Image (cartoon, rainbow, N blue to C red):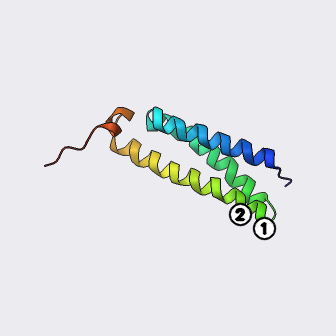
Amino acid sequence: MWWSAGNDIALRTDLLEVAERYDNSPSAGSLADTDQFLTRVTMAADHARVGRVQRELRIPQAEAATLMGQLVWDASQRSDHTTAHRPKKSR
């Protein structure tokens, strides 16, 4: 697969947009977008030649996988984004 700096910039821009939505909207709503991005970057990395390009693609892949984990955890622990910003009640 041929890869260019423009493709890398587009992936990073897409990742930033997905991460920004995580900060500003309910987690459940961001799951599909993050999954789509993670699938796209994983496929690109899997089909890239072994070496620098593949290593560079694994970075946004790892970041997206981390974000996906946060989204799943958040979606399972709270009903809306506002809850994440409330301080926890001490017992």
Q: Position of residue 27 (x, y in %)?
A: 45, 38
Residue on which the image places disc 2: 55
Q: Position of residue 5 (x, y in %)?
A: 80, 49
Q: Residue furthest bottom?
A: 51
Q: Residue 33 sits in which quadrant?
A: top right
Whether residue 24 is situated above or below residue 59 in the rendered picture: above
Left or right? Give the position of 24 relative to 16. left
Whether residue 65 is situated above or below residue 75 in the rendered picture: below
Image marks 1 and 2: residues in contact by CB distance under 8 Å: yes
| SS state under label 2 | helix
Q: Residue 36 sits in which quadrant?
A: top right
Q: Residue at x 64, y 44 (%)?
A: 37
Q: Residue at x 57, y 53 (%)?
A: 63
Residue on which the image places disc 1: 51
Q: Residue at x 34, y 44 (%)?
A: 77
Left or right? Give the position of 68 relative to 86. right
Q: Position of residue 91 (x, y in %)?
A: 13, 49
82 or 27, which lies in front? Answer: 82
Whether residue 62 is situated above or below residue 35 in the rendered picture: below
| SS state under label 1 | loop
Q: Residue furthest right?
A: 2
Q: CA distance from mark 1 to mark 2?
A: 6 Å
Label 2 crowd (10 A; few <14 / some 14-19 / many >=20): some
- The residue type indicated by label 2 comes to Arg
Label 1 crowd (10 A; few <14 / some 14-19 / many >=20): few
